[in-house]
């Protein structure tokens, strides 16, 4: 059993027990089990340079910090997936219970298979108040509260009262009853083989806020009121009455009866705690790297898209990822889960259904046999709550397993803050908590991308999640933009093998041109950035390679448009030397001192030259590139195109034109920035402007792009032709 503390500032509820059981002193020997060690233990709490008041990664036994409220229940359920012998006791604060993520997470019980999964025992702690307000669930009737949780599918048990000793006995009795009920449910499912959704037990614990503390301070009610959430006795340095009241409160626990003269817990109380890995702070599930096993990975090269020429074949990029994950899930039946909000098939990952279905413990209808892909025993998890899905996966990883979370790009923002919290957890673990073992990376696939929202429109156009990712510690975040299916396979293989990162992969689900044979794709992704010699013409003959312009791209649609622009330039201006650079690993653009993947100035200038104009076509908001390259020399030569919030119901080319990432605007950008073109290219510029007008008019009349645009292929066979 492990413990999840959901209420804000809930660390004391974990720190106290793990110190008393001896775990804390084993991990941090200076916090020894005596008066001197206890004093150090107390002083460090919420003190500069030490530990916080939330259940931070430094806390033994924790897989949930709780600094941001709402994720305790989803984390608890994620921990028990494919963990049949694990029970997670999860305390939910009644303030936390008002959050959206927590409200949807109660439905996690519809996804727990009692035969293959463990169980969660939620405990709703109703103490009545938040920072300065009553809580909603504490101010509704007992009947309504019971109906609420019965409606969620639980059997609620109520433990209510104010007398500590009576409540201890009542809670112990109900806890034992609930655990026995859980064991009974699991035994029935595992022996009979009949898998149905049970009514899992949960507990409603109603106690006063500030329980056993001072009833009043300075004539104002504190116990059983919201003031006990704050600092009612804040005058320790200048108010003798506050100091006296604190002393009386602490002495009311009779520490002289609990500790010996050295400040060590007396043996008869120490003996009450479990021993070894059964202790609260040493359970290996709460340090999942101890249990993690590497995935059995198929050779991703076996799924390669075959091609005879660069940029002439089309394929759905994410479909090959579905094929790869199908075989990963086949070969790893108990430690890999795929999670996404009702979009597995939409994001072209549906080949996983050949080996496992969507887990579903609610009712299944006969008509579901016609393609709904539901199963009591599935390992694909779909629910229209990104918070719950990511919470499941985070805890699944933190307890030693592997997985992928996929979602539409625009709606990844729903879990922006959740991403932040997991990144901070990994950051602290990596840099400050050496005893925590490495866990599998959180792999996130963003698909249904901004540039292909042909009928969804403006609401589905937002590539800004990647901006958020770049704000986090460079040691824990990675951003990949594979331009085609073979590159996606190479990137995915790397991400599934990695530990202690958040890997964000941006790849569209529609048909796209395929650019690199597998060997070239592997080399390109290994470097993370590189020149596509087959699309360039600056390496012809024996003269030094000196391009007139660099065409750079990052992302599948921007890459195609940049290639098409390059083809126009090479046809219109045969003497123009063009170098084509593609970026897979976005952090390659950052200076080497700012990110572990960053290029040195020597390497950056080798690729992009020290002084030639760069036309950079980017998947996301253009200013992000300027942020990443701010240390590079001669910023004025770097011209970035990207999404500028100019969208609606658009054809792909129309949307590209509106945001000036299209081939015609890119040609105009080159003409404007290469000195030897300028007015000498006036006729070409006019043709590009006319083509923009023509393409927009065609899209508005026919509802689609011209065939020459839709079926465009890379024309290069010889880069120097």
Image (cartoon, rainbow, N blue to C red):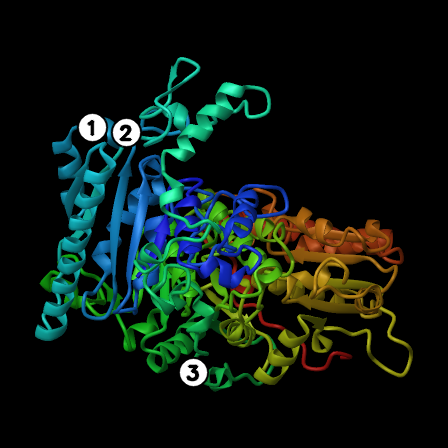
Q: Is residue 286 left or right of residue 28?
A: left
Q: Label 3 belongs to which residue? A: 296
Closest to the observer, 600 or 559: 600
Asked if marks 2 and 1 touch (Cβ < 8 Å), the reply is: yes
x, y percent for residue 540: 83, 80
Whole-angstrom CA distance, mark 2 to mark 3, is 48 Å
Most extreme residue toward the right is 543
Residue 531's mark? Answer: none
Q: Earlier in the sequence, mark 1 or mark 3?
A: 1
Asked if marks 2 and 3 touch (Cβ < 8 Å), the reply is: no
* Residue shown at 35% from the left, 76% from the top: 329
Q: Is label 1 in a helix, a strand or a loop?
A: loop
Whole-angstrom CA distance, mark 2 to mark 1, is 7 Å
Closest to the observer, 678 or 546: 546
Q: Earlier in the sequence, mark 2 or mark 3?
A: 2
* Residue shown at 26% from the left, 49% from the top: 122
x, y percent for residue 528: 66, 70
Q: Label 2 belongs to which residue? A: 136
Q: Label 1 belongs to which residue? A: 140
């Amino acid at each position: 059993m492990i413990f999840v503390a959901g209420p804000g500032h809930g660390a004391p509820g974990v720190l106290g027990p793990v110190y008393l059981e001896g775990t804390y002193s084993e991990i941090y020997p200076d916090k020894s089990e005596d008066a001197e060690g206890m004093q150090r233990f107390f002083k460090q709490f919420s003190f500069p340079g030490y530990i916080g008041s939330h259940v931070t990664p430094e806390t033994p036994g924790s897989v949930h910090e709780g600094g941001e409220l709402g994720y305790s229940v989803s984390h608890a359920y994620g921990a028990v997936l494919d963990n049949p012998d694990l029970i997670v006791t999860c305390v939910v604060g009644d303030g936390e219970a008002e959050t959206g993520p927590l409200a949807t997470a109660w439905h996690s019980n519809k996804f727990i298979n009692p035969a293959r999964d463990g169980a969660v025992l939620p405990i709703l702690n109703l103490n009545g108040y938040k920072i300065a307000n009553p809580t909603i669930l504490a101010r509704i009737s007992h009947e309504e509260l019971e109906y609420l949780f019965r409606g969620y599918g639980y059997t609620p048990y109520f433990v209510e009262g104010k007398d500590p000793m009576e409540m201890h006995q009542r809670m112990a009795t109900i806890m034992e009853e609930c655990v026995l009920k859980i064991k009974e449910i699991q035994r029935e499912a595992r022996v009979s083989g009949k898998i149905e959704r049970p009514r899992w037990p949960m507990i409603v614990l109603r106690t006063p806020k500030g329980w056993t503390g001072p009833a009043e301070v300075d004539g104002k009610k504190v116990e059983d009121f919201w003031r006990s959430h704050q600092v009612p006795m804040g005058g320790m340095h200048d108010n003798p009455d506050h100091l006296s009241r604190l002393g009386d409160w602490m002495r009311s626990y009779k520490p002289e009866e609990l500790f010996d003269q050295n400040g060590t817990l007396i043996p008869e109380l120490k003996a009450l705690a479990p021993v070894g890995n059964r202790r609260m702070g040493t359970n290996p599930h709460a340090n999942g790297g101890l249990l993690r096993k590497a995935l059995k990975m198929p050779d991703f090269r076996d799924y390669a898209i075959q091609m005879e020429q660069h940029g002439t074949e089309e394929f759905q990029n994410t479909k090959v990822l579905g094929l790869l994950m199908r075989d990963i899930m086949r070969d790893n039946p108990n430690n890999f889960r795929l999670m996404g909000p009702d979009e597995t098939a939409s994001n072209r990952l549906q080949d996983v259904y050949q080996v496992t279905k969507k887990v579903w413990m609610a009712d299944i209808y006969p008509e579901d046999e016609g393609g709904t892909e539901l199963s009591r025993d599935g390992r694909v998890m779909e629910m229209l709550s990104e918070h719950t899905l990511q919470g499941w996966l985070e805890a699944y990883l933190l307890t030693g397993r592997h997985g992928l979370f996929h979602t539409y790009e625009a709606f990844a923002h729903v879990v922006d803050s959740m991403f932040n919290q997991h990144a901070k957890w990994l950051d602290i673990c990596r840099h400050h908590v050496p005893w925590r073992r490495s866990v599998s990376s959180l792999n996130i696939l963003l698909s249904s991308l901004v540039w292909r929202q042909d009928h969804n429109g403006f609401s589905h156009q937002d590539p800004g999640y990647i901006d958020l990712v770049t704000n986090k510690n460079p040691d824990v975040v990675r951003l990949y933009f594979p331009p085609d299916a073979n590159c996606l396979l190479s990137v995915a293989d790397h991400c599934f093998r990695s530990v202690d990162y958040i890997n964000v992969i941006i790849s569209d689900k529609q048909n796209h041109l395929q650019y690199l044979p597998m060997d070239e794709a592997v080399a390109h992704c290994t470097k993370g950035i590189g020149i596509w010699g087959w699309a360039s013409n600056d390496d012809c003959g024996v003269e030094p390679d000196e391009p007139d312009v660099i065409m750079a791209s990052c992302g599948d649609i921007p890459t195609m448009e940049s290639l098409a622009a390059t083809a126009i330039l090479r046809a219109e201006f045969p003497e123009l030397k063009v170098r084509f650079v593609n970026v897979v690993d976005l952090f390659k653009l950052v200076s080497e001192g700012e990110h572990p993947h960053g290029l040195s100035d020597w390497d950056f200038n080798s690729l992009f030259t020290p002084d030639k104009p760069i036309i950079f076509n980017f998947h996301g908001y253009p200013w992000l590139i300027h942020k990443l390259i701010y240390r590079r020399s001669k910023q004025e030569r770097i011209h970035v195109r990207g999404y500028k919030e100019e969208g609606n119901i658009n054809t792909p080319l129309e949307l590209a034109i509106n945001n000036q990432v299209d081939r015609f605007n890119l040609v105009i950008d080159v003409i404007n920035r290469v000195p030897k073109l300028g007015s000498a290219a006036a006729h070409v510029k006019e043709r590009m402007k006319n083509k923009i007008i023509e393409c927009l008019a065609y899209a508005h009349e026919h509802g689609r792009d011209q065939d020459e645009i839709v079926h465009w292929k890379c024309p290069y066979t010889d880069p120097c032709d």
